[in-house]
Amino acid sequence: MLVDLRSDTVTRPTPGMRAAMAEAEVGDDVFGEDPTVNLLEQRTAALFGKEAGLFCPSGTMTNQIAVNVHTRPGDEVLCEEGAHIYRYEGGGVMANSGCSVKFLLHDRGRFTAEAVRSAHSDPSNPHLARTRLVNIENTSNRGGGALWDIREVQRIRTTCTDLGLALHMDGARIFNAIIATGSTALAWGELFDSVSICLSKGLGAPVGSVLVGSKAFIQEARRIRKRFGGGMRQAGIIAAAGLYALDHHVERLAEDHTHAVELGRALAGHAYVSNVFPVESNIVVCTLGEADKLDALLQHLEQRGVRAMAFGPGMMRMVTHLNVDRSCIDRTIQALASFAV
């Protein structure tokens, strides 16, 4: 069996999830008549302490809708340079919403309230783009699954309130952060104006993300979803997978984290690896001592039934998920050990 560690997006629905999808009650969601979608939206919003939710095909769409609702063309979005909304969403911030982006100084994707305050543009200066939105990604993908300290996010929330800025969380892996830190969805949700929650990564649903916020925010978000082509009809079939994931796949994320730590420890023990990012959740990122050996390592792993991903010059990423069990970890560790530089 192939061990696919390229991403936690490669997961396949479990038998129980497939059964839930097959049995889902459906209706026309664009008319607001799909009961399974409605239940998923209501339940997810309640988990994060929000008034309403909106089910979308992808986390990219929920992020881009959030940017569009929070901003006007010509506004400025603050984020770090590796943020998914900037690096991996096809230039959507600029193309969809007409906004510019200003990068914040960061530590593996995490920045401070002071960095936000320092980057904020003077709103009285007509030469400058109006700073309007701050984006936090938790966990930080480019940071190797780095976890945010909720106390710093509380300080960022206070700063955003003082400066009149909206605060959005790209929570593509927020449940990984919740399990890893022992926090709650409610504690995180109350700090943000909007949250994007991905169901198709660690939670193992085949597709879908939910955007949550106030009723007024989601009402406008629904209009933007339609404009972006994200209105779905009998979407309860896939929403049922999300509901199943919330019931069955959250607590088990701790197992993925344990597996990631073991992979990180194995990588750190090899001379061809110069650095391994601290492993805090389900993402393992390492840097090779010789960058030009990366292709050879990836090919070596592929030949032994293990897939990993190039993540930059001389950098490799591995992501654990529900289709990676103990035997997969052992197989990967053996394949890493047999690589000869």
Image (tube, grey):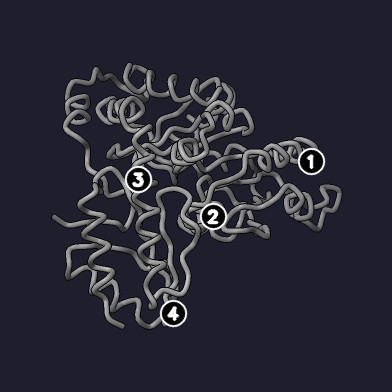
Q: Is residue 32 left or right of residue 128?
A: left
If the image is split into quadrants, where does the C terminus sit?
A: bottom left
Amino acid at pointer 3: Asp
Q: Position of residue 235 (x, y in %)?
A: 29, 28
Amino acid at pointer 4: Gly
Q: CA distance from mark 2 to mark 3?
A: 23 Å
Residue that mark 1 sits on: 163
Amino acid at pointer 2: Ala
Q: Nearer the viewer, residue 293 or 76?
A: 293
Residue at image coords 45%, 25%: 44
Which numbered disc, 2 or 3, marks the residue closer to the eye?
A: 3
Tell me if residue 105 comes above or below residue 320 in the rendering. below
- Which callout, 1 or 4, points at the residue further toward the start of the chain? 1
Tell me if residue 48 comes above or below residue 101 in the rendering. above
Residue that mark 3 sits on: 256
Determine crowd level at label 1: few under 14, some 14-19, many 20+ residues with C-alpha closer than 10 A: some
Q: Which mark is residue 83?
A: 2
**Marks 3,4: beta carbons within 8 A:** no
Q: Position of residue 230 (x, y in %)?
A: 39, 37
